[in-house]
């Protein structure tokens, strides 16, 4: 199958989701990864095989290298697992990655900030302002 034939088979709604995810996530969502959105595929956070929907809320961008590290069972402690940051948190809706127990025995969720420098800058400015306030007092 040629690339043109493959493109012709993708539904317009799937293109809309892909473009939206690229705009929102900007690249691979695994912490520390720098792969741009154009180098990523869609990953179902709740696996498609277990009934996870193919919609914007259940998809995330993952580069091929990282996709290979995600286990089919999100509760398998020996591979990476993904979920979504809950509503009400500072990063609501962002994809969290839980590392395997060999990296973090507690499997604490992590978020990739590299494609979102505005979050890093906001936190730095918050610390800077707090330091200035402390120095003035």
Image: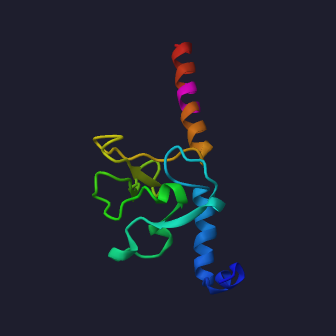
Residue occupying image coordinates x 52% and y 24%: 130
- Image quadrant of residue 47? bottom left
- Residue sticking out furthest to the right: 4
Instruction: Report the label total.
Output: 0
Q: Position of residue 50 (x, y in %)?
A: 32, 75
Of residues 22 and 102, the one nearer the viewer is 102
Q: Quadrant of the N terminus?
A: bottom right
Q: Is residue 85 magenta?
A: no
Q: Position of residue 27 (x, y in %)?
A: 60, 55
Colour scheme of the rendered structure: rainbow
Give the overall secondary structure of the magenta segment. Answer: helix
Residue occupying image coordinates x 58% and y 78%: 14
Residue occupying image coordinates x 64% and y 82%: 6
Relative horizontal placement of residue 98, taking residue 39 as reference (left or right): left
Relative height, residue 55 to residue 10 (above, below): above
Relative height, residue 81 to residue 15 (above, below): above
- Image quadrant of residue 2? bottom right
Of residues 106 and 1, the one nearer the viewer is 1
Q: Is residue 127 magenta?
A: yes
Query: Which segment did they paint magenta?
Result: 125-129
Of residues 46 and 33, the one nearer the viewer is 33
Relative height, residue 17 to residue 40 (above, below): below
Relative height, residue 18 to residue 126 (above, below): below
Q: Position of residue 120 (x, y in %)?
A: 57, 38
Relative horizontal placement of residue 42, taking residue 73 as reference (left or right): right
Q: Position of residue 48 (x, y in %)?
A: 40, 74
- Residue sticking out furthest to the front: 1
């Amino acid at each position: 199958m040629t690339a043109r034939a493959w493109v012709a088979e993708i539904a317009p709604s799937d293109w809309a989701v892909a473009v939206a995810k690229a705009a929102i996530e900007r690249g691979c969502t695994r912490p520390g990864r720098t792969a741009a959105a154009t180098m990523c595929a869609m990953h179902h956070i709740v696996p498609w095989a277990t009934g996870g929907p193919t919609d914007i809320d259940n998809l995330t961008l993952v580069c091929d290298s990282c996709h290979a590290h995600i286990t089919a069972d999100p509760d398998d402690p020996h591979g990476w697992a993904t979920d979504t940051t809950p509503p009400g948190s500072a990063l609501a809706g962002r994809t969290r990655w839980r590392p395997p127990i060999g990296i973090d025995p507690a499997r604490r969720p992590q978020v990739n900030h590299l494609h979102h420098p505005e979050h890093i800058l906001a936190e730095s400015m918050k610390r800077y302002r707090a330091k200035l306030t402390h120095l003035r007092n």
